[in-house]
Amino acid sequence: MKNKTEVSRPWGAHVSTAGGVDKAPERGEKIGASAVQIFTKNNNRWSGPPIDPEKAARFRQESANRQVSTVASHVCYLINLASPDPELLKKSREAFLDEIDRADLLGVPYLVFHPGAHVGSGMDEGIKKVAESLEWAMAARPESPAILTLETTAGQGTGLGHTFGQLARIMDLAGDKERLGVCVDTCHIFAAGYDLLEKKGYNATFKSFDDEIGLDKIKLFHINDSKKPQGSRVDRHEHIGKGYIGKPGFDLLVNDKRFVSTPMVLETPKGPDGREDIENLTVLRKMVK
Ligand SMILES: [Zn+2]
Ligand SMILES: [Zn+2]
């Protein structure tokens, strides 16, 4: 376990909620995290049992006691807010509302989701559908404090959100921008073609983000190296420094003054004891100048 001065940055990893959401803070503490991401239910199921209010209360207590804050809840993988199939779209939207309610019950600020896949209906149609879905969800939950956080994607298949311009269009069309944010996944933007390798390319990438969306919209980072080269459009996470982004790219990110208070969570491969998370966080901390 790291002492708290070493974890002053809001850094951590995605942690398991096996056995209940209230187990997440302890798992975060074990890897020396101050920020974690969770699934609030099985990530491959449309619905899950409701969160027991007692567990939710214990979750809040544990988060405070262990000083581990769950900054993000990642929605289940089945949801496609851009689906051209009316049945699947309806199911996706309802499941998305349930995800909002779960995040709100736990007081998790950012609800992270992949924008969706157009499945052959075309990019423009897909973007319109996601925006409509978000508009619908925000109208259905007018009081929800959760920030609906679009994740940048690698651009596999018909997936949306692999350019900052696409995310900007979705957010513009959806309206109420105060309730929307972006999660930048380093592996995904790199696989999508954005440069992170040296200062010039790194700066150009975030300049482009700022021009298209605005840096203030970056609510968190998924901090993953990439098993595949820049522009491959293949989403394969690698341990920090061991992939194609490599240490120089992460060095630029962790020393970027603009992001010192932005949460960063790992989604890199790991075993049940989380040893790999500890190693990756150590590698990142050592880079801080
Ligand atoms: Zn991610
Ligand atoms: Zn990924």
Image (cartoon, helix red, strand yellow):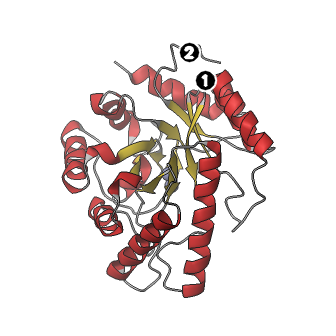
What label sits on residue 67 in the rendered view? 1
Q: Residues within 10 Å of mark 2 (few under 14, many from 20)?
A: few
Kindly identify the residue that appears in the image at 31 percent across and 69 percent down: 173
Q: Residues within 10 Å of mark 1 (few under 14, many from 20)?
A: some
Residue type for callout 2: Lys
Is residue 230 something one can see in this rendering? no
* Rendered view: 148 above or below 108: below
Instruction: Give how far across and how far down residue 115 sits, in percent.
Output: 45, 65
Q: Are marks 1 and 2 in contact (CB under 8 Å)?
A: yes
Residue type for callout 1: Gln
Q: As drawn, is 75 to the left or to the right of 240?
A: right
Where is residue 158, by image quadrant? bottom left
Mark before the other along the chain sequence, 1 or 2: 2
Q: Which residue is mark 2?
A: 4
Kindly report the distance in space between the C-alpha atoms of the residues bearing marks 1 and 2: 9 Å
Instruction: Give how far across and how far down residue 117 sits, in percent.
Output: 46, 74
Quick one: SS at disc 2? loop
Given the current orientation, which residue lies at the most extreme front position?
143
In front of the other: 151 or 233: 151
